Image (cartoon, helix red, strand yellow):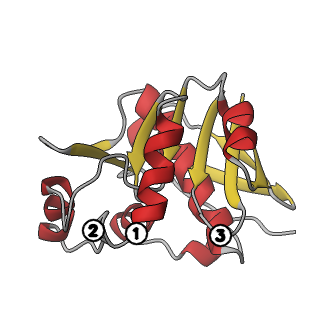
Amino acid sequence: MECGIDLAVKRKSAVAVLEGKTIEVKFLMTDEELINTCRSASVVAIDAPLTYANGFREVDRLLISKGLRVFPPSFIKSLTERGIRLAKHLRAIETHPTSSFKLLGWDWRTISKIKDEADSVISVLTAHLYLEGGTLILRARDGEIHLLNKSPRLQKTGEKRYELVETSSLTQWCYTNFTH
């Protein structure tokens, strides 16, 4: 099992849980709910900074140098603090779904009409590919961010529900969107 969390502070966080090939998205409010949902996950990809800095971190500057846009942790202090707090209880990696969308040339609306849901799905796919050594890793002394640079094939099977359809080779994966 893997989890992807689009972390929020003042609203519910979107949590995508991948078990087998099925992804289900939930919206949860408290740290306790998030930890209980993802505690047994092999890895949890969190869309929030997992290290703190005043201003941009070196790892943020790496993303910016590639034309990707991020906020410095000090600008989103409450979110950063929550991410760091959750990461202490989970096997967590940091991700940035908006950057993955840009690298893949995807519009998040092809996954869901709800941005938080789409971000959580991309986050759980990042967690899944991380376990297979298939993420793009941007690493600096103050953190690392994992991004998708390969396109998994994903089928929407219902409301807040998706199916991961793998082909024979990780490098041959492609994305298709089916709506109901």
Distance from disc 1 to disc 2, alpha carbons, whole Å, reads 7 Å
Q: Position of residue 74 (x, y in %)?
A: 30, 67
Camera-side residue of 67 and 15: 15
The answer to whether mark 1 and mark 2 are in CB contact below 8 A is yes
> Residue at the spot x=42%, y=33% of the render?
130
Task: Check disc 3 and give the amino acid type.
Answer: Lys
Secondary structure at numbered mark 2: loop
Residue 17 lies, with reference to residue 180, above or below; the image says: above
Which numbered circle lies on residue 133?
Answer: none
x, y (%) of residue 163?
Answer: 74, 45
Q: Earlier in the sequence, mark 2 or mark 3?
A: 3
Q: Residue at x 56, y 73 (%)?
A: 108
Residue 33 visible to the viewer: yes
Residue 76 numbered tag? 1
Q: Quadrant of the N terminus?
A: top right
Tag shown at residue 72: 2
Label 1 or label 3, whichever comes before in sequence order: 3
Residue carrying label 3: 10
**Which part of the image, by quadrant, shows the C terminus?**
bottom right
Q: CA distance from mark 2 to mark 3?
A: 19 Å
Return the residue nearer the eye: 74 or 92. Answer: 74
Rendered location of residue 122, percent (x, y): 54, 55
Query: What number of labels is visible?
Result: 3
On the image, which quarter does residue 48 sit in? bottom left
Q: Disc 1 to disc 3, how far (Cα)?
A: 12 Å
Residue 96 left/right relative to 56? right
- Tell me the kind of residue under disc 1: Ile
* Image coordinates for residue 3, horizontal then vertical, percent: 62, 39
Q: Nearer the viewer, residue 114 or 71?
A: 71
